[in-house]
Image: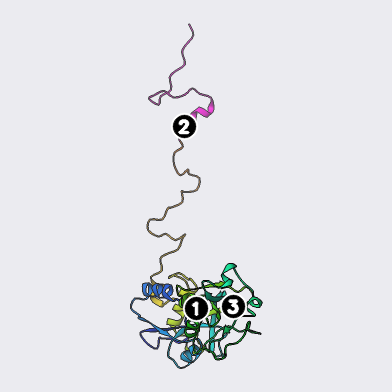
Amino acid sequence: MTGSDASSSFRLAYVPGVTPAKWVRIWNERLPDVPLHLVAVSAAEACGVLRDGGADAGFVRLPVDGADLSAIPLYTETSVVVVPKDHLVTAADEVLAEELADEIVLHPLDDTLDWEQRPGRPAIERPATTADAVELVAAGVGVLVVPQSLARLHHRRDLTYRPVADAPTSRVALSWPQEATTDLVEDFIGIVRGRTVNSSRGRRPEAAAAEPKGKGQDAGGARRKPAAGKPARKPAGKSPRSASGGGQAGKGGRRGRPRRRS
């Protein structure tokens, strides 16, 4: 990790389908003096942008190409088939890839799924982008299998989707160049991992200085333990003398003398 940050801002790349809003909000709360700039990139160019210094870190789709990039897997997405709302596929809650055998399954050039054998029949030409493929689905040309987040990103009222149970999944990760693991990158890693502002890792030095005293220290307002052998408060109920068999105390707290027999 470098000793100081290379710039006074942080650039975060993200691929289509990833919504970084939650992490950006936490960043702005914790480091309001360091602007965070979002950089939208395609899945194919994400690693190149990180290597070229176009972003300090980025949300990418695995695998990353090369050992010079660090990556922390975050979550795995279900793959779905995008179809017109009146398609036969919509009769089921989910489908298998073999059930698409008679369909033209579009394969855009920016596809991120790693198939061993693609289902269905190929189109005459591959669409340039996932967005173009969605337009073709709406026109009745074929169907499209994509990570669920991309189906939501390109949502249309005339289209819907269903999970494909045996399709490859897509994993999203936070990645950055190993040789450029700055303090700000560590800060963002801490946010993504869910660490608190006072965590011992992934925080800036000023955050450590502001950390409150932990439990067990004599901080202001802390409760003190009672001294050894002494009760925390005076017990209510009978007087201690009542345990020796004497009579109960009167209203004034005084015990009366026993009457003499005549």
> How many residues crowd around disc 2 within 10 Å: few (fewer than 14), some, or many (20 or more)?
few
Count of number-bearing discs: 3
Magenta residues (range): 236-262
**Is residue 194 shown left or right of residue 163?**
left
The percent coordinates of residue 110 (x first, y second) are 52, 87
Q: Residue beneath label 2, please?
A: 237
Q: Residue beneath label 3, please?
A: 169
Q: Are marks 2 and 3 in contact (CB under 8 Å)?
A: no
The percent coordinates of residue 164 (x first, y second) are 60, 74
User: Secondary structure beneath disc 1?
Assistant: helix
Q: Residue at x 42, y 64 (%)?
A: 213
**Was residue 257 drawn as part of the magenta stretch in this picture?**
yes
For residue 150, the mark is 1
> How many residues crowd around disc 3 within 10 Å: few (fewer than 14), some, or many (20 or more)?
some
Q: Is residue 236 above or below residue 245?
A: below
User: Secondary structure beneath disc 2?
Assistant: loop
Q: What residue type is labelled 3?
A: Thr
- Nearest the viewer among 247 and 59 is 59
Quarter of image, res 103: bottom right
Q: Distance between the residues labelled 3 and 1?
A: 13 Å
- Nearest the viewer among 129 and 221 is 129
User: Secondary structure beneath disc 3?
Assistant: loop
